[in-house]
Image (tube, helix red, strand yellow):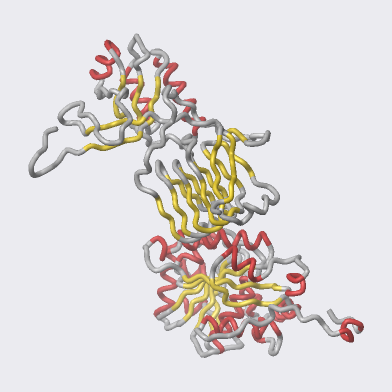
Amino acid sequence: MTRIVVVTSGKGGVGKTTSSASFSSGLALRGHKTVVIDFDVGLRNLDLIMGCERRVVYDFVNVIQGEATLNQALIKDKNSENLFVLPASQTRDKDALSQDGVEKVINDLKEMGFEYIICDSPAGIETGALLAAYFADDALVVTNPEVSSVRDSDRILGILASKSRRAVMGEEPIKEFLLLTRYNPKRVEDGEMLSLQDIEDILRIKLIGVIPESESVLQASNQGLPAIHIKQSDVSEAYLDVVARYLGEDKPLRFTEYQKPSLLKRWLGGK
Amino acid sequence: MTQSNHALTFKSATLYAVRVVLHEHNTPNLIASLGQRMQDAGGFFAQEPVVIDASGLNETPNWPLLLAAFAQHALPVLGVFAHGEVLISAVASGLVSIDITASKSADSGRLQNTDAIAVELATPARLAEPKPQVALELGTADTPIVLETPKEPTTFLPAPQTMVVHGPLRSGQRIYARQCDLIVMGVVSQGAEVIADGNIHIYGPLRGKAMAGALGLADARIFTTSLDAELVAVAGVYRVIEGVLPATIHRKPSMIYLKDEVLVIEPLGD
């Protein structure tokens, strides 16, 4: 049974594309046939983060409008043989997407045997975001530990609960998961950032993982490599934990406590 | 009361309606005034059943024109309350005569004709103009229409069917419990709004806006297990909550009600 997962947030710049790339890579590393779709028509980024921007010939909009087949548009990821990328169009805008068009593509992908379809949503609550979320079974709501991101995530949760296909058809609701990104335990302890507990209290959805703030994310995107592939880094470990928890494993939370560096380290300029 | 023994039965029904009192018979003036009121109220009165009170008129307005105006504003007219010539002409235009001096008791209605359902009309309470607790600039708030009030004080009308809403109410969501009480099981997030014509009970933190007694019921109350609201209002009297509340009510079970037209916030329980 194919599972459709939307990675959404409401707020922009919180880590949706970064997380879509790493999450789908993680599923593929575990042997699941996965496709990740970029719904940000006109401002496509997923292809850059996945490192396949030079191999885009046909895109999502071409497929919807019948100008290309899925096989022509899908790009095989160079890091994992189970992972495929369906990039967005850069030249068109979001009006090129239609609900029927998206439905057909998703059904075709199901027939191709994909186990997971990850939808990378654009920011906002307009057509692109609504369409990315419409067919979802699960939702990863990406949130930064700061007030405007939490407010926007709350808003998008309301929209998922009322405007998705499952809501409209009266089926079992979308399973919502909180993915906290750019978490900085030191700033939480200093009181500058909202804590994990505060955010859980406000949003009241199941936490699937905490991704710490890290320089390796920028390095990864510059290299065109999803962060999960940067071995041994904290971000990579955190994303691997997220994938494990999504697949049902029980993993304790890491990277949420501030480790005060030892006196020596502080003298020598540690953070 | 005639009772048919198989295909149908006659029962009584209680209906809330809006009474539109006509002060003059000049039909163009009436139509213009209606338009202005509807514009001022936004969508507030759309689809609300209306009884036209022409009891104060001695001369007849142009009923067909007037009724067309009401239809245009999506205000279904149930009937007319009038006397003498005015009533005769209204009935001739197809309106039903409705006597709204009937008592407000909740049980029996009165059959007007054998083929009419028993309708008992509660005269609506005075719609309060928004009165802030503290002197504030009102900005561009819509002022609801003030309708004629009866001389008797507003009685507490029983809630027909309480609306119960489950699950967290998220930012941007709004619930309006029309003509009844509202119960919310779960948190009302910042940016969410709960509105009721009756009372509001929130079994969860109230972090958004709550407005009880929306049509002017001054007895309405708001209850919550954890008060952290942005704004609370009862019968139009509102208070924006900036800064931190006293420790006895901040994030504690609380009750908000009107006492002598002043908003009171009290801790609940012992």
Residue B94, horizontal then vertical, whole percent: 24, 23
Residue B222, horizontal then vertical, whole percent: 51, 46
Picture residue at 35% right of the left edge, 17% below the top: B54
Residues A80 and A177: in front is: A177
Picture residue at 44% right of the left edge, 73% below the top: A106
B205 lies left or right of B30: right
B61 versus B136 height, above or below: above
Residue B56, horizontal then vertical, whole percent: 37, 14
A48 versus A122 height, above or below: below
- The image quadrant that residue A217 belongs to is bottom right
Residues B222 and B6: in front is: B222
Picture residue at 24% right of the left edge, 33% below the top: B108
Residue B260, horizontal then vertical, whole percent: 56, 32
Question: How many labels, in total?
Answer: 0
B163 lies left or right of B189: left
B24 versus B67 height, above or below: above
B98 lies left or right of B156: left
What residue occupies the far right of the structure in this picture? A267
A143 versus B162 height, above or below: below
Does residue A155 show up?
yes
Tell me the quadrant of the picture where the N terminus of chain A can be found. Answer: bottom left
Does residue A40 show up?
no
- The image quadrant that residue A268 belongs to is bottom right
B60 lies left or right of B222: left
What residue occupies the far left of the structure in this picture? B5
Picture residue at 61% right of the left edge, 71% below the top: A16
Tell me the quadrant of the picture where the C terminus of chain A can be found. Answer: bottom right
